[in-house]
Image (cartoon, grey):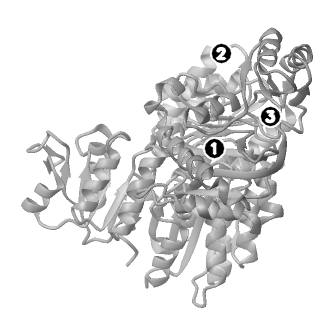
Amino acid sequence: MKLYEYEAKNIAKQYGVPVPRGRVAFTPTEARQVASEIGGEVVVKAQVLVGSRGLAGGVKFASSPEEAAEVASRLLSSEMRGVKVSAVLVEEKICISRELYLSLTIDRAARKPVFLVSEMGGVEIEDLARKYPGKIKRIYIDPEVGYTSYMARIALTALNLPWSLIGDLDSLLKSMYRIMVEYDAELVEFNPLVLTCDGKVVAVDAKIIVDDNSLQRHPELQKLHGREYLDFERRARELGFSYVELDGDIGVISNGAGLTMATMDFILYYGGRPANFLDIGGGATRDRVKEAVKLMLQHPRSRVLLVNIFGGITRCDEVALGIVDALGEMEELKPIIVRMLGTNEEEGRRILREHNIDSYVEMDEAVKAAVEASRRG
Amino acid sequence: MGILVDSSTRVIVQGITGREGAFHTKLMLDYGTKIIAGTSPGKGGMYVHGVPVYNTIEEAIREQGSIDASIVFVPARFAPDAVYEAVDSGLKTVVVITEGIPLHDELKFINYARKKGVVIVGPNTPGLLTVGECKLGIMPGHVFKRGSIGLVSRSGTLTYEIARELGKQGFGVSTVVGLGGDPVTGLDFIDVYDMFLRDQGTEAVVLVGEIGGDAEERFALYYRGLSVRKPVVAYIAGRTAPPGKRMGHAGAIISMGIGDYSSKRRTLEESGILVADTPSQIPMLLGGLLR
């Protein structure tokens, strides 16, 4: 779960990480108030969970509280990559001498937390890794030992900072590791971390991503979970399905994450476009199948549904009954193509045949049929 | 033949009295797995499908003799504790079926087990199976025909699909290993390929990857540097997955510029590994390599 910049900065501040003075504002009036408390020039930043905010025009400067209110008003009525902006962060403008990159994430290969440190900050890590792979220093933490101070000395050298800042950097890195452990974060990122004109280190942007599997340990975050999802994603997740919105017109229902992705990819292979990823999970019961089919019948962009169930122990008669139930309960129907395998296969196919629904044994044939049906639309 | 488990492997089921644990204990017994005992704190003295239940692994070993491997069906909150118990009891292999374990808990027990030389399979895995000998997992046993293809995968159902495709074309499997769907897992492609290299019962390897992380890329680079190899055919799921979205598995996410389909495919192909476009192409590509 991604946190907003202002939430990440509030946490950082509690752990003693230096961040610019400022506060979140939800209305232009609040923005004016914050700007006048800060005094002088301010920066107004749209609070969105999508990347490349700067390029999308989400970061503006203002030289007076009135201008801050105006800028905030414009940002608060805008959309950024399809998401409505509902808050802005108003902060003092920092005089920047150098922009640095500092993050703490999980290295999958080493199975350890790792600091990524670079003196080339301010660009997204994706670009940094592509353009200057040699400019990223990696410092690993043994999770059984935790953070120790020599890591700051390595980071200081990599960042090319003066020795006088070693104490500040040590407490910054220590705080990052504490945040990671105490918030069960998979990412704590300060980009840019800046060296100010008066020689201090300040986190000008902050990002924290919390591990979804750990949310039950953080009830205050758990209740916010799901806010980054689009409407349809939220509905699907409330039903307990793993769901991701795509942009095609063939609705996909499958079981298992890998098979669901393979089904989407197969659609593309035959020249069609998947509308979504929907994994109903293991042991598909009649009711689960019904809910999934009902949901996708209401999906605005899908014109055809493809149900692909590889039943190891799943009963095909249950799958068939779930599909028939869903079709019986809904007014607006769509062509539905079913591929299923497993126990009671013959009975399942008989049930579907009675309702004039095509069912297939092979994934190839079912996908091909779905793509053809989507063309007939 | 096969890797990690065989017909002589003596198994304990941790969390044997739970719904999943009991259900799959029955299926594993039916497959022929030598299940010696089960654990379930507070339920010692019970029997599940004829398997004696103990409060601790220590007690199970004392009464039933040595145990080689465990399979964990314990809920996420208690799973790390179960893994520590298995590692400290001297077991060699621990299969963690449980999904949803907090990432930082996993990091700790995986590092701990590796230092002690204990193999962790998973977490969030369908398990592993040496065909006709031992099933330490939840996969439907009948889809795997006996043969000489080593199958290593990051997913569950897709692996069954691929095993079925292989079987249709006359290819059987030696051992199938589910690495698990989480961002960090005990084993990775390199570890398992190394075991398949040493296994006389394995002729070639099918690698089933997915978007997220760089385990496939790391394997490709490792493979490139080997002087002795067995042929590999790969399939990667998630060509149509958008960046920044978690595709079901906690580990299936393209983030910070790492984990997209094209990088995996390119790196594998640059190492001379054939990559199938669809699951049904895998047997054809294998056939070309082996015949």
Question: Which quadrant of the structure image shows residue B67?
Answer: bottom left
Residue A249 is marked as 3
Q: Residue at x 66, y 76 (%)?
A: B221
Q: Secondary structure at mark 1?
A: loop
The answer to whether any part of residue A22 appears in the image is yes
- Which amino acid, by three-letter code, is at mark 2? Met
Q: Give the crowd class for mark 2: few <14, some 14-19, many >=20 residues within 10 Å.
A: few
Q: Is residue A372 above or below residue A92?
A: below
Check disc 2 and report the residue beneath it.
A330
Q: Residue at x 71, y 41 (%)?
A: A203
Q: Residue at x 68, y 58 (%)?
A: A117
Give the letter of the chain under mark 3. A
Question: Which quadrant of the structure image shows residue A135?
Answer: bottom right
Q: Secondary structure at mark 3?
A: loop
Q: Position of residue A239 (x, y in %)?
A: 55, 24
Q: Is residue B201 left or right of residue A191?
A: left
